[in-house]
Amino acid sequence: MRSRTSLVALMGAAALALTSCAASGASPGGGGDTGALAEGKTFTTVISTDPGSLDPLITVMSVARSIDRFLYSRLVEVQDDGSVVSGLASEWEADTTTATFTLRDGITCEDGTPLTATDVAANISHIGDPANGSPLVGLQVQPGTSAVGDDDAGTVTVTSGRPDSFLLQNIGSIAIVCGTVLDDPDALAKGEGATGMFTMTEIIPNSQYTLTRREDFTWGPGDWDPEQAGLPEKVVFRVVPNETTATNLLLSGEVNAALVIGPDAKRLEDAGLFKTALPVAVGQMIFNQAEGRPTADQEVREALMQALDLPQLRQVLTGGVGTVPTGLVTISPNPCRADVVDGFLPEVDAKAAAKALDDAGWIAGSDGIREKDGKRLELGMIYSSLQGDAGNAGAELIQATWKELGVDLTVKSADSPTLSETLFVTGDWDVSAAPITVSLPSMLVPFYSGPTPPNGTNFASIENADYTAAVTAASNKAGDEGCDDWGKAEQALYATTSVIPFANQDRSTYAQKATFIENDGIDPASIRMYE
């Protein structure tokens, strides 16, 4: 079984981290004087942290998956409007329990050997077997899912382990690796076994990752033309933790693209650079309900949230440009777009919050910190370092507010690997302010129900019968037919203060002498380089 230390699901400021696993899209937001298309260029883009393992069968870190996007192809590509176009597969059909994909002709691995239907089926079955410890179980592949490949016909037939409303999108969006490395986590950690547009040619940890375009890559997405002008010959992912530094590098032309969400974005806006816009969660509070944690008590969770001025916190986290979420799913295709949050966000009432803690038996001590049964109300909160100064300011505001309530809160900013280790391995946390960003409601299920680490990804140890019942009802309905049930599932989480979303923000990636479409990472086939 592989380690879960590389888990973090679109968690953090930039659709992290746990960034979505299915394809989703952010159309270009415009800007930038592109000029003439250029040949033979290197596209250099900034990432804010080292990705760690690149194994696409195990990582749900958005930074790692953004690199995997360049290395590994998918059976289909899901567009911003929810439509599906070909990837490795030229034809497909699916319902909630079975799917069949017909592969394109001439698909090869990075070493030139054919990628067979048997190889593709083995990828799916490998993830679907819980014994292999993939965090994609329940996220994209239901437990017990299996697949069979017919190499003569070029077809892959999938049988889902349990009903899945979005079986086509979920199975179709798996990163497919070559059969030769399927059981070699060391090779996959280094990005080997590529089936996509690029291959990994150099790794310098904490510095940069260099990829080279495959001349034989012709399979997608859709009717994509591999002979078109402007495609990059190489791609470099450069690790630059500081947004101001990244902004300076972008304005000077030393890099082509960078995600900037803090105050430096104004400089890039003023420069009129090309940008994309992807709506992501930046403000979420998730509470650890494991036995023995103070936050296992719903009265405590409710009091903590009631003490916070969420509009003020939203202002701090987003610089005043954030919006109130309508649900936990924020990025396309997001098939269920009703507002299921309205009426569930608590309004600030410090006196009521203090009374609730009094009623729960947490009484203020001589130093103002509350105690119960000889135990001080000491909590630990973790948040993503990707949120930068805004995240730090938000954490300080929460810390100060809860101190007035009588809570001794320790806050910790963490990079993606540390977030993953804390949430999914050590479990030593009480409050997570690292949001989960997904594109389909089914992707939330393994994080808010089912087995806990190390046997699953229910990192907050949530047991909510109403949530499970609504998910079961929704999963038996195809696509948006289950949206009412998916909405009820989310509301069951809000009603128990298990997770409270309070701020969304458009995440923009800015570019110089390049354009592209952004989804769960930049779409490599969409990059065009300019003189």
Image (tube, helix red, strand yellow):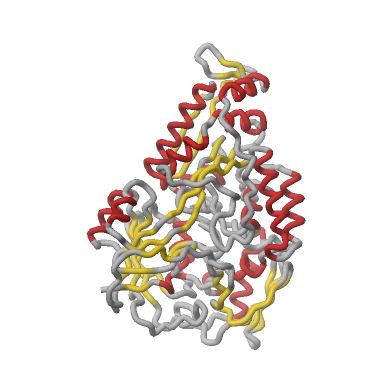
Res 479 → quadrant? bottom right
Front-most of residues 240 and 211: 240
Residue 425 appearing in the image: no
Residue at image x 60%, y 75%?
A: 120
* Image spot of residue 22 (x, y percent): 56, 64
Image height of 253 relative to 505, above or below: below
Image height of 155 relative to 471, above or below: below
* Image spot of residue 451 (x, y percent): 68, 48
In this image, 153 relative to 266: left or right?
right
Res 492 → quadrant? top right
Which residue ends up furthest to the left in the rendered image? Answer: 252
* Image spot of residue 468 (x, y percent): 73, 49
Residue at image x 65%, y 48%?
A: 340
Number of dots carrying numbers: 0
Residue 371 appearing in the image: yes
In this image, 412 relative to 84: left or right?
left
Residue at image x 76%, y 50%?
A: 469
Residue at image x 56%, y 30%?
A: 348
Quarter of the figure with the C terminus:
bottom left
* Image spot of residue 317 (x, y percent): 44, 41
Image height of 11 relative to 141, above or below: above
Front-most of residues 159 and 320: 320
Quarter of the figure with the N terminus:
bottom right
